[in-house]
Image (cartoon, rainbow, N blue to C red):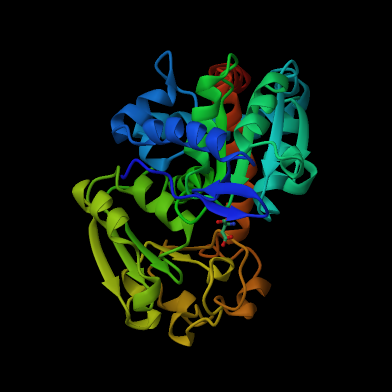
Amino acid sequence: MKNSIEFSEKEGGFYWGNIYWGKNKKVAEFDAKKFKEFINQSPEEIKQACYKEGRLNHIIRAEHFDLSFLETICETARAARKVAKLEDKSIKKLLSSKSVLNFFAQPSQRTFLSFSLAEAHLGMRREEVRDIRTSSFSKGESEKDSLRTISSYFDALVCRNPSDIYDLFAVWVMKNSDREIPVINAGSGKREHPTQGILDYYTVRESFKGELEGRTFVYVGDCARGRTVHSLAKIMALHKGTEAYFIAPEELQIDEETEKYIVERGTKVFKETKPLKELINLADVVYMTRIQDEHGGEGEYNQDYVFSLEMLELMKEGSILMHPMPKRDEIDPRIDYLKKHPKVMYWRQQRNGMWARVALLAYVFGVDEQIRKHYQRMKV
Ligand code: ASP
């Protein structure tokens, strides 16, 4: 990466990496250069920066996960669900001394609500900022200073942002502050949605009773900009013998960097433009996505890639249909009216999201083991 910062200037302020660095060019340059030093480190150094005392502290990228971390989260999610159902109070006390800010600078329904509810389940105090204009940018405050302020009030930050590097930016800010609070990436730009990756993994793991080796995933739609596709494909590459088919028109195909990453870890990759119908019988998991037209281009969905009602029958016995949601016209509307169809997983996938996030927050604050142990004691 070059060393000069090419700012874009809007309304007298300086932007780089889709992040606002304030109104003064000298200050903006000084700060942005420091951040650049941080992101120019090797992926391994960045990963280590996200750890604290041997545990993952900042949950920002799927590539930082390993199978033992994922198993811990899944076991905790299962235990939390049972404990909360049977005796809500014991789980509520766990994080009642902690506070969290849900800082969502992009639209969100599921992720926002499920985080908010997960925090409530654990008894956390929570605040939200959903409209970036209510922060001090309008007064010329840089996003760096604004985030640092958050670290002096809260014990954790859950953030969603259109910038592809906002997660790294938030970690960098926290590492420079005197209170390094955990950062949880609730979706950054087009590349990462690690907590969706975790909840998708939890859903897949529950569906296949933990038998995940050699599974075939068929990702359909906007594989280029669907950040959930990137996160899940990276996570599944941790399992041996996984195959990933990406079905999309050329311009919406998976990017080379992600392809290389998962191929290097042993996943067989097939980039396809054939109609979904021709490949559907190969899938253990069909993962549909919408066109991410908020990033530009046409929103028109290719009819060859629509999941029709008939396809449920063409899918293998025991296979599942997933979607990170929101969906539009890429799934046949008749499918929503089938009650408890064993292959239709996207509504259950949403519900799983809340429990996966309970588990994740518990893990970040080191109370996950208490939940699992409590559940064990309840069982005997
Ligand atoms: N909700 C997911 C996300 O935030 C999927 C989507 O919006 O299409 O990336």
Q: Residue 141, percent across and down?
A: 69, 36
The answer to whether one can see residue 28 in this image is: yes
The answer to whether one can see residue 131 in this image is: no
Name the side, left or right, on which 124 lies relative to 301: right
Measuring 69% from the left and 46% from the top, which residue is drawn there?
112
Query: How many numbered tags mark residues here?
Result: 0
Task: Choose top left, top right, bottom left or bottom right for residue 179.
Answer: top right
Name the side, left or right, on which 168 lies relative to 284: right
Residue lying farthest bottom? 303
Q: Specify the quadrant that holds the N terminus.
A: top left
Tell which of 311 and 152 is nearer to you: 152
Q: Residue 120, percent across and down?
A: 76, 32
Task: Choose top left, top right, bottom left or bottom right for residue 336.
Answer: bottom right
Q: Is residue 364 above or below residue 160?
A: above
Q: Is residue 361 above or below residue 253?
A: above
Tell which of 316 and 233 is nearer to you: 233
Tell which of 273 and 61 is nearer to you: 61
Q: Is residue 96 above or below residue 164?
A: above
Name the side, left or right, on which 127 lies relative to 206: right
Q: Residue 360, percent across and down?
A: 56, 31
The quarter of the picture showing ligand 1 = bottom right
Name the side, left or right, on which 83 lies relative to 46: right
Measuring 63% from the left and 80% from the top, which residue is drawn there?
334
Measuring 45% from the left and 46% from the top, which residue is drawn there?
201
